[in-house]
Image: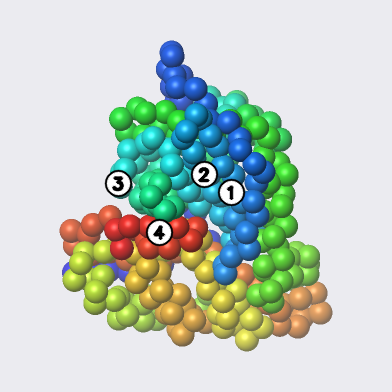
Amino acid sequence: MRKVALSLLAGAALASSAAAVEPGAPEAFQTDGQWRLSTLEDGCSVARDFVRGDERVTLSIKRIHPRSAVQFAVVGAPIIEGSGSLEAGFLPSDNLHRFDRVASASIGEREGVVFAGRLFPKPEEGEERLEASEVTDFVIVDPRGTKTTLHTRAIDQAIAALDSCVTDRLKDFGLDLEAHSKLDKHVTLLDVGKLAEAIQRGYPKEAVRKGWDGMVPLRLIIDGNGRVVHCHVTNFLTAKVLRDAACDAMKEHARFDPAKDAEGNPATDFAFQQVRYLTAGGQRPFSADAHGFAIRHD
């Protein structure tokens, strides 16, 4: 049995939990070099190395849209290998964020993990939102309670460079965010039922056979004719065959009522869409190419 669900402009919520501060916790990893900005096929990333004695950890933050959710990669940290959950977040904060979809990754022989969510979680009631200029550390706690602290210091310049790069990438895809902010009307997805049926028919046989399922979060760029001209996955925590199938289906079958500018002319717009693939007894599928790292379990 297989099912497909569609969700337009929806975001996934992650639960928060208290960040435990253990007495005698291991010394923090210190910065080694500057943040490195990379332009990717679908967006941009910033990465920085951290060292503690002979140990080296790489933290990478990838984003495909300004101020959207990000994909984290932490490689080289002494945290549990394999799939599972973890808690992570920037300090100072009273809470770490729980991530329940975690993929194993590697750079060369160094092992690590990839997970995705908001850069800064929504603050609890009465708590102020953390600003990038206030950041001191990035903390990861694995299911065994092993805690790794990266002394990042402020990350405002790195995130500003990341979002500037992402904005430029959008221009490459034909979307000018300044012009977009002045649109009189945004796109509307047409005939959701027909689209869901098309995606259902295209559920990859390999994924059905292997029990692969999961959520595929997408950013779509839609032209003035209401057709999807670019489709990018916002994180790579679902099997690649499903990610590819979701984008192929959107490009071929999705139709939108086009956006209009102030003069009533058709205009380029974007939309966030989620496609959930469901199988009976599905497993936890992980990707093969997040951040350009070698991700296992695909």
Circle 2 Cα neighbour tier, 10 Å, few/some/many (<14 / 14–19 / ≥20) = many
Mark 4 — residue? 294
Mark 4 residue type: Ala
Q: Which residue is mark 2?
A: 58
Q: Which mark is residue 82?
A: 3
Q: Earlier in the sequence, mark 3 or mark 4?
A: 3
Q: Which residue is mark 1?
A: 47
Q: Secondary structure at mark 1?
A: strand
SS type, badge 2: strand
Mark 3 vs mark 2, foreground winner is: 2
| Cα–Cα span, label 2 and label 1 | 7 Å
Residue at 43%, 79% (x, y): give it: 248
For residue 260, what is the image quadrant? bottom right
Q: Residues within 10 Å of mark 1 (few under 14, many from 20)?
A: some
In the image, taking residue 97 as reference, residue 90 lies left or right, namely: right
Q: CA distance from mark 3 to mark 4?
A: 13 Å
Taking 83 as reference, is 252 above or below it?
Answer: below
| Marks 1,4: beta carbons within 8 A | no
